[in-house]
Image (tube, grey):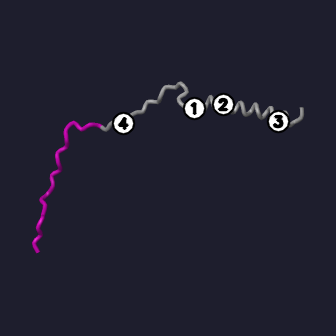
Amino acid sequence: MDTEAIAKILGGIIVAVVLVAAVVFGPIGQGGKPAKEVQTIQPPKAAVPAAPVVRGPVVRDVPQ
């Protein structure tokens, strides 16, 4: 065999190994794994509604 034939055989082996590794370690769908649970964050509920803020007097008409 000449070197070109050896290179083709070794190249084919390397390609096969890379493809097998990609299938084994790659993210192909769920692959039989259970779905990840999505955690929902709920805001804390206020027990009693807060009283409105007391403000000062409102001046509507300003004398000139």
Residue at 62% across, 28% down: 24
Mark 2 and mark 3 lie on one chain; the one further toward the N terminus is: 3
Amino acid under disc 3: Ala
- Front label number (4 vs 2): 2
Segment tinted magenta in the rendering? 44-64
Mark 2 and mark 1 lie on one chain; the one further toward the N terminus is: 2
Residue 26 image position (x, y, % from top left): 60, 33
Q: Secondary structure at mark 2?
A: helix
The quarter of the picture where the C terminus appears is: bottom left
Mark 1 and mark 4 lie on one chain; the one further toward the N terminus is: 1
Report the side of 44 relative to 5 (left or right): left
Amino acid under disc 2: Ala
Amino acid under disc 4: Ile
Residue 42 image position (x, y, % from top left): 33, 36
Q: Which residue does the numbered mark 2 point to in the structure image?
A: 21
Q: Secondary structure at mark 1?
A: loop
